[in-house]
Image (spheres, rainbow, N blue to C red):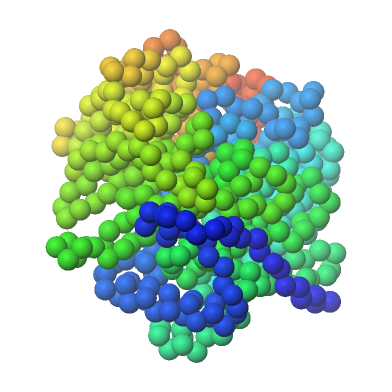
Amino acid sequence: MLITIALLTAGAIVAQSALTPAAAAARLVPYSSCDEALTELKQAARRSLEESRRHTGSGPIGVVPPATLEDAAGSAEAQPDSGAASSAPRHSSTTVHEAGVDEPDLVKTDGRRIVSVTGGELRVTDPVTHRVTTARTRGPIGDSATVSLHGDRALVAAGSQRRSGRYRGTGSALTLFDLGPSGSTPQPRELGTLSTDGEYVDARQVGSQVRVVVRFQPGMRTVRAIESSTIADWLPRYRVERDGVTSSYTVGCDQLSHPASYSGTSMLTVLTIDLGSDGIGDGEPMTIVADGQTVYGTGESLYVANARQRPGPAWSPAPQTTTELFKFDVSRPGRPVYSAGGEVGGALLNQYSLSEHDGFLRVATTSYAQQSSQSAVHVLRTDGDRLETVGQVGGLGRGERIYAVRFVGPLGYVVTFKQTDPLYTLDLHDPSDPRVTGELKINGYSAYLHPAGDGRLLGVGQEASDRGRIQGSQLSLFDVSDPATPTRLAQHVLPRTRSEVEVDPHAFLYWPSTATVVMPVLSGFDRSAGAAALVVRLDGDRFAELGTIAHPGVDGDAATGLIRRSLVIGDTLWTLSDAGLMASDLRTAGRQAWVPFEPNYR
């Protein structure tokens, strides 16, 4: 049975007021009709196509491709899942940017079970009996899948390649599973799937509410395709499958809103999935005509950032990069509300370039001009429907780019790199007057910074020679208790290795109770050359290596034994790969048990 329903999207419409150009560009304007929507979308598409052809190497529709893989982030203290039973063993949680805001990842635990999505399968593992159950789905979940967990519900988000159709890139599917009572491992039961033609960007979870960001980009690469398009070619569509019934939804064109100055022709949608419900629902989509690649969330706000190239001035033909910011109010259950927008110069590194504190948004960017570059931290305040810049400090790392950012309360830490690694400390107590208070220059760089308490930071990155040649993974301990004189207390280097933590901090684990750091490392640049998890204990002001953990591959394929994640349940350290789960002693890193996964040959 096929049911077609038109969805109305909420949009913030405000009275006209005096706006700065950047704020005005991000202000939402509704379409008066479908005819007007089609006309303006075609005009924007033609402009974007012309811009992308003028600037060799720029992305389609004027979008700047991210320089690195989009990452997640870390909290100083792992917390148990809010939906877990109170008697569950003490356990770690996903390394996240903001405390209380969970992020989807390859593995989750409530202390009584380990829920993972690797090798295209959703698996539930009992950490006591080592029994593994696998979800039965209508097709492979996909190697890029992630999972969110709340109570007995798991939401799997996965992308699917689309070789043809109305949209470029990938489609996405959100599948809700019932895992059964905590402490048991029945077969996970599928409660429904919400599929979209758009590309999954990222998600954030507060309590049972998961906000999923999806971007739709119509596949119109020529003027002819643009001119012959109809409004149906532009509107996002969704399909919900539950109990054998498929329902189709389309966003109403007359309900779309767009910034006064278009960032392209993409549709940016925020879906809401309630993991406390008995079904997947329709996602309650909120859609605007905009683009976005970076997602950052707090308990009350969701930000989506878009890197955009604009034509440069006459004396500098190179395109100028700016970052558009879209803020949504997610303080209440259900459909989010667009609340404000703004723009800053330069490009973000990742979600850690964004941080909200005491009502102000801090944004770290790198700007490029001719053969040079420099970085800055901007401070913005919400004023009505505008994000207005109230303070800025620039000139960071001239000729370099940002490699890591971390904001901790009213303080900020920025790492730039080209040959040496300046670690800048920033005082952000006065939003209108942010200041650089200290600088530490050392070889190499940190790509991820993690608060370790007592005025200390852990850094994961690469050691480098005096000329900037990288030499291997390094773990650093910084003392930033005096912002004027940051120092490095300890360093642990593994020559000729690299770590996934550099591009995805979800791979990082810091367990404060035993001051234990766990991070995957890969020898050389060959996935089959050797992979392990490094286990290090922080002993005062020095590192003590406990050892490394390695997984066997499946059918002789060493790449399947590549360790991706680690977690703690009680006194046991668990490590995850496509091949299985390994239990080790948290205090010694000694092997306790190996739980192999059945290969997925679908």
Please provide percent x and percent y for residue 538: 45, 16
Q: Is residue 32 above or below residue 204?
A: below
Q: Quadrant of residue 405?
A: top left
Residue 394 vs residue 451, the one in the foreground: 394
Drawn side of residue 21 relative to residue 341, left or right: left
Please provide percent x and percent y for residue 501: 44, 38
Residue in the picture at 52% in, 85% down: 229
Number of numbered markers: 0
| Residue 266 in sight | yes
Drawn side of residue 313 relative to residue 586, left or right: left
Quarter placement of the C terminus? bottom right
Quarter placement of the N terminus? bottom right
Of all residues, the one furthest to the top in this rendering is 540
Please provide percent x and percent y for residue 549: 51, 30
Residue in the picture at 84% in, 51% down: 278
Residue 107 vs residue 240, the one in the foreground: 240
Q: Is residue 45 above or below residue 586?
A: below
Q: Is residue 181 above or below residue 478?
A: below
Q: Quadrant of residue 591?
A: top right
Q: Quadrant of residue 576?
A: top right
Please provide percent x and percent y for residue 197: 60, 69
Residue in the picture at 43% in, 10% down: 540
Residue in the picture at 17% in, 55% down: 370
Residue 47 vs residue 240, the one in the foreground: 47
| Residue 599 in sight | no
